[in-house]
Image: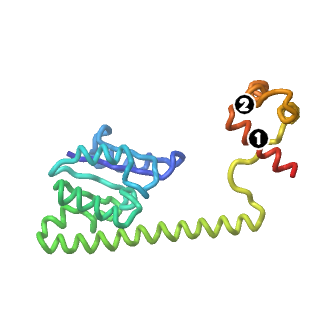
Amino acid sequence: MKFGYVRVSTKDQNIDRQVTKMQDKGIEERYIFMDKQSGKSFDRPNYQAMRLMVRQGDEVYLDALDRLGRDYDGIITEWKYITREVGADIIVLENESLFDSRKFKSMGDLGKLLEDQFLSMLSYVAEQERKKNNARQAEGIVEARKKGVKFGRPKQEISQAFKDEYAKWKSEEITATQAMKNLDMKPNTFYRRVKEYEESNK
């Protein structure tokens, strides 16, 4: 049986390109497992569901090695579990000419040695690329902050209605619960706004 595993890091990223590649390989839609989650951890619901279904002789297709994960040790552990413990195969479409566990198996002990070398090399490259991306992102944030760019949610303007209710609450004319009700605010929103208002008036 053929399985496809596709992953993007955030919910905003488009997963269609990877899905199309799996469909082109003749993989049924119900056997294409998708996660919109970071690759740092392998505790992803759909990956784990696929992992439980894979049996000896099955084939697992990935668009690229880093779709499996972004942790060097984790990639090696998962690859060896699927290909050696379960007895299934993994095919990485981005490097299919080199990275296809079916080819390694056909070479016997030499294939296992070559597979270990390729896996270590490609996993290492994937992790180093992730570290470089993180470093570039951190540098970009530092530079942007120097130029006055602010990150995070923009603070909302404090309305006059809030100021009035705040003043009544502080003077103990009303309770915090009553102020929240009057403003139609949830507790976490109310107290966050209180903090922002008080900080702006220091």
In the rendering, at what x and y percent does residue 22 appear?
33, 48
Position of the N terminus by quadrant? top left
Residue found at x 77% / y 25%: 178
Q: Rate crowding at label 1 as few (under 14), some (14 to 19) or many (20 or more) other CA atoms within 10 Å.
A: some
> Up-down: is 107 above or below 184?
below
Kind of residue at badge 1: Arg
Q: How is the image coloured?
A: rainbow
Kind of residue at badge 2: Met
Q: Which of 6 and 145 is in front in this view?
A: 145
Residue found at x 29% / y 58%: 78
**Horizontal side of residue 20 vs 196, given as left or right:** left
> Up-down: is 1 above or below 149?
above
Give the CA separation, mark 1 to mark 2: 10 Å
Q: Which of 55 and 187 is in front in this view?
A: 187
**Horizontal side of residue 75 vs 166, given as left or right:** left
The residue beneath circle 2 is 185
Label 2 residue SS: loop
The residue beneath circle 1 is 193
In the rendering, at what x and y percent does residue 45 appear?
37, 44
Label 1 residue SS: helix
Quadrant assignment, res 66: bottom left
Q: Which of 100 and 189 is in front in this view?
A: 189
